[in-house]
């Protein structure tokens, strides 16, 4: 009887054990929670319904550093895969081990995850951050700057600013949504950071390099006249940091300064005004004579000088030079020169003392737009005696004349020469039918005298 009783009891216990295990299959154990929700003894479908309601009403708040964004579940495209999520939660408990499971707590919060449109979320958050950053203060890298009061370069510390790092905010929102967290607090760590900090050793090196550069004091001269100065005030405007944080010259700013200097100093073809020895004020422009700054060589000279912090006087390198320099707009030749006055039809030659040593009336080119004698400042080219002058109109030779004294100043095409065929010189002969093809006609005796005085390389000023 005792054996039968024990067998019956065992059967009853087995039935009870199996019954309880079956009961907890698809049902949560006691002491089961999901976040703040007690789901003890709830069925899978009941929990799915309750969690679905929670997710439908879910909102994510992202705030901090002046930024505030609230995303609803629909905004972020959140959806809840109830069977999968609840199934993962139930898998944490073994219904056949219910005698042991009943005594422990079951927190399934970490299994509560949502699915959502990552692309949609990223676009929403990124757009909001970009709108915020439009009026925020961007971070500034540490750099080097010139302090006028101290007269030296020093390191300027970085500035964090108030702009947010969109990537970091998107990542935080991503993680919060996945776990259905309701709040993201943006701390300073979410701000955009500078990429260069004052502790960067390269900045200290750049300060030393820049302070060497501003020791430069190049006094630029042309024919003894100071035309510019490369000093600390100027160099400080050219120094910048390159991509490797080395102190480097701003090539654009340096070139712009060089172009401005050259435009002030170049005289070839420019308008000059001077007072002739007899008191007449003359303005002349054009020609090939004068000063022309060699920009490339000057650029190299200045760059080398700045790199080493050189000081001292430097002659401005020029591709062409004159015999004197008095600044833009002024006479840039010395006392010795030939003056051809087209309005007076008179030529004068002054020697090294500035004294008038020769003069003569002349006949210049016919003023018809084709044979005018060109005005301007020129060099006298190599003279020749005798010489044959040949003129063409297109491919047709229109004259061939032998002269005894040929003194060209516009290439070998226009010059002064004897013209024994002219009945007279001076006055209005040049426009009364006796004008030349552009040359300056002189009486033979006067041409001979000038030929004996003038030399190749002498300055010729032809003007009205």
Image: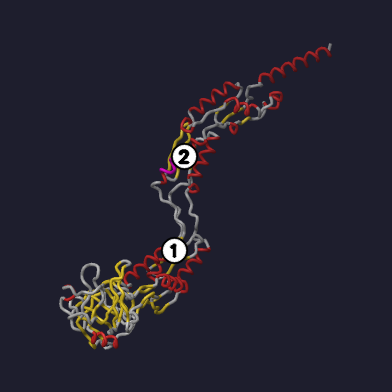
Residue 242 spot, x, y in % from top left: 48, 61
- Give the position of the C terminus as an image quadrant: bottom left
Please tell me whether residue 114 is drawn above or below residue 266 in the rendered image. Answer: above
Residue 39: x, y in percent? 58, 25
Determine which residue is flagged by label 2: 125
Quadrant containing the N terminus is: top right
Task: Specify whether residue 267 is in view.
Answer: no
Question: Residue 65, image x and y in percent?
Answer: 44, 46
- Residue 463 left/right relative to 97: left
Between 274 and 457, the one lying in front of the other is 457
| Mark 2 Cα shell of 10 Å, populated few (<14), some (14-19), many (≥20) | many
Residue 143 vertical position relative to residue 81 in the rendered view, above or below: below
Q: For the magenta stretch, what is the residue range?
A: 125-131
Q: Nearer the viewer, residue 106 or 313?
A: 313
Residue 34 shown left or right of residue 450 in the figure: right
Most distant residue in the top direction: 1
In the rendered image, residue 129 lying in the magenta stretch gets the answer: yes
Mark number displayed over residue 240: 1
Q: SS for tag 1?
A: strand
Q: Main secondary structure of the magenta part?
A: helix
Residue found 57% across the figure and 25% down from its top? 82
């Amino acid at each position: 009887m005792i054996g039968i009783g024990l067998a019956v009891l065992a059967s009853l216990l087995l039935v009870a054990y199996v019954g309880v295990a079956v009961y907890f299959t698809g049902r949560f154990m006691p002491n089961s929670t999901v976040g703040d929700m007690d789901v003890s003894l709830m069925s899978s479908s009941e929990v799915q319904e309750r969690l679905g309601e929670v997710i439908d009403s879910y909102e994510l708040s992202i705030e901090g550093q002046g930024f505030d964004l609230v995303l609803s579940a629909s905004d972020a495209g959140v959806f809840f895969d109830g069977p999968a999520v609840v199934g993962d939660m139930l898998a944490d408990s073994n219904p056949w081990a219910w005698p042991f499971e009943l005594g422990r707590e079951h927190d399934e919060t970490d299994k509560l995850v949502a699915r959502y449109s990552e692309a949609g979320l990223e676009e929403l958050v990124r757009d909001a951050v970009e709108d915020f950053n439009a009026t925020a203060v961007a971070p500034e890298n540490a750099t080097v700057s010139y302090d006028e009061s101290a007269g030296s370069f020093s390191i300027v510390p970085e500035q964090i600013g108030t702009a947010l790092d969109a990537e970091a905010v998107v990542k935080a929102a991503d993680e919060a949504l996945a776990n259905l967290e309701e709040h993201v607090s943006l701390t300073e760590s979410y701000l955009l950071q500078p990429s260069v900090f004052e502790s960067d050793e390269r900045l200290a090196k750049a300060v030393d390099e820049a302070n060497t550069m501003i020791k430069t004091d190049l006094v630029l001269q042309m024919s003894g006249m100071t035309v510019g100065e490369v000093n600390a005030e100027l160099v400080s405007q050219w120094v910048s940091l390159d991509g490797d944080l080395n102190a480097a010259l701003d090539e654009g700013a340096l070139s712009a300064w060089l172009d401005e200097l050259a435009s002030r100093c170049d005289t070839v073809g420019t308008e000059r005004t001077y007072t002739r020895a007899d008191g007449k004020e003359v303005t002349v422009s054009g020609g090939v004579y004068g000063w022309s700054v060699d920009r490339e060589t000057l650029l190299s000279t200045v760059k080398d000088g700045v790199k080493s912090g050189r000081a001292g006087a430097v002659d401005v390198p020029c591709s062409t030079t004159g015999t004197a320099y008095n600044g833009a707009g002024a006479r840039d030749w010395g006392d010795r020169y030939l003056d051809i006055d087209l309005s007076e039809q008179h030529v004068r030659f002054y020697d090294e003392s500035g004294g008038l040593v020769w003069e003569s009336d002349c006949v210049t080119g016919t003023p018809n737009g084709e044979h005018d004698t060109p005005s301007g400042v020129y060099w006298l080219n190599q003279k020749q005696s005798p010489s044959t002058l040949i003129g063409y109109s297109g491919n047709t030779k229109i004259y061939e004349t032998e002269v005894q004294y040929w003194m060209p100043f516009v290439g070998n095409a226009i010059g002064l020469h004897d013209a024994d065929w002219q009945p007279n010189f001076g006055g209005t002969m040049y426009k009364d039918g006796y004008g030349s093809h552009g040359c300056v006609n002189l009486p033979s005796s006067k041409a001979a005298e000038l030929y004996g005085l003038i030399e190749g390389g002498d300055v010729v000023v032809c003007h009205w």
